[in-house]
Image (spheres, grey):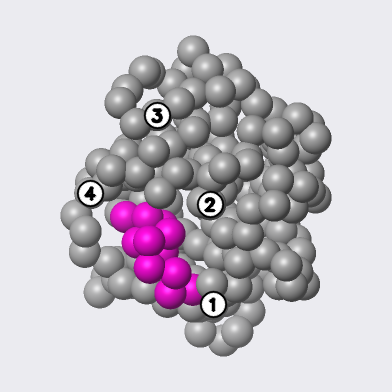
Amino acid sequence: MKIALIAANGNAGSRILAELVSRGHHVTAIVRDPAKVPEQPGVTVVAGDANHPEALAKLLPGHDAVISAAKFTHVKAENLLAAVRAAGIKRYLVVGGAGSLAAADGSLEMDSPRFPAHVKPEASEGARFLALLKASSDLDWTYLSPSRFFEPGTRTGKFRLGTDHMLFDDKGVSRISMEDYAIALADELEQGAHVRQRFTVGY
């Protein structure tokens, strides 16, 4: 497939880029500074700012899907959605947040008194983005939430999928490496098992 990947040079974006290329997809890496993405086969790097939806929309036609890996506090959800819609792209995948996942008692992760205050703005914007997607009827969207701890690590290919509740491993820790997250996102891109749904991935 031909995929447009917004924020392809970030921690999550760069790992998603590597995973997609390893599977033979052609990726248009959309970043503010093209110098930050190394040249490699299967990747076309273009300059684009997701906060300018009219300009971004011009970069998207001709792609089979758009993936956004941008931080929610860096880019307004409305701008991203406007660009995708203006380009006429139906399939839209979003690197989501864990803050809107539910605990066993149904309360949201970001509402816990233990939730770090400095992360709350990002989590709140992520939850708002998810609500906008759920209210849309014109996009084949998917929002993939990582686990609580979402960091660079190892690509194992061994993980579990869930829906709206946070996943925990056998030690009671909620975590996923960015490399394994990228596998789950690429699988979803290829298989479309969670269209118009949020799901999550963890060990």
Q: Which residue is mark 2?
A: 65
Q: Label 2 is placed on what type of residue?
A: Ala
Q: Is residue 141 left or right of residue 80?
A: left
Quote the CA–CA distance across marks 2 and 4: 24 Å
The quarter of the displayed image where residue 14 is located: top left
What residue is drawn where x is 78% and y is 37%?
53
Q: Main secondary structure of the magenta part?
A: helix
Instruction: Tell me the crowding category of disc 2: few under 14, some 14 to 19, or many 20 or more residues within 10 angstroms, Cα based.
Output: many
Of residues 192 and 32, the one nearer the viewer is: 192
- The segment highlighted magenta reads 183-194
Mark sitting earlier along the chain (4/1): 4
Q: Which residue is mark 1?
A: 164
Q: Mark 1 or mark 2, which is nearer the start of the sequence?
A: 2
Q: Residues within 10 Å of mark 3 (few under 14, many from 20)?
A: many
Residue that badge 3 annotates: 43
Q: Residue 185: x and y, percent? A: 41, 57
Q: Secondary structure at mark 1?
A: loop
Closer to the camera in the image, 173 or 179: 179
Which mark is in front, 3 or 1? 3
- As drawn, the residue found furthest toward the bottom would be 105
Q: Where is mark 4, residue-wise?
A: 155
Q: Is residue 99 left or right of residue 53?
A: left
**Residue neighbourhood size for the residue with mark 4, other residues' Cα within 10 Å, grouped as few (<14), some (14–19), many (≥20):** some
Assign the C terminus to one quadrant of the image.
Answer: bottom left
Disc 3 to disc 2, C-alpha distance: 15 Å
- Disc 4 marks which amino acid? Arg
Looking at the image, can residue 155 be seen?
yes
Residue sitting at the far front? 62
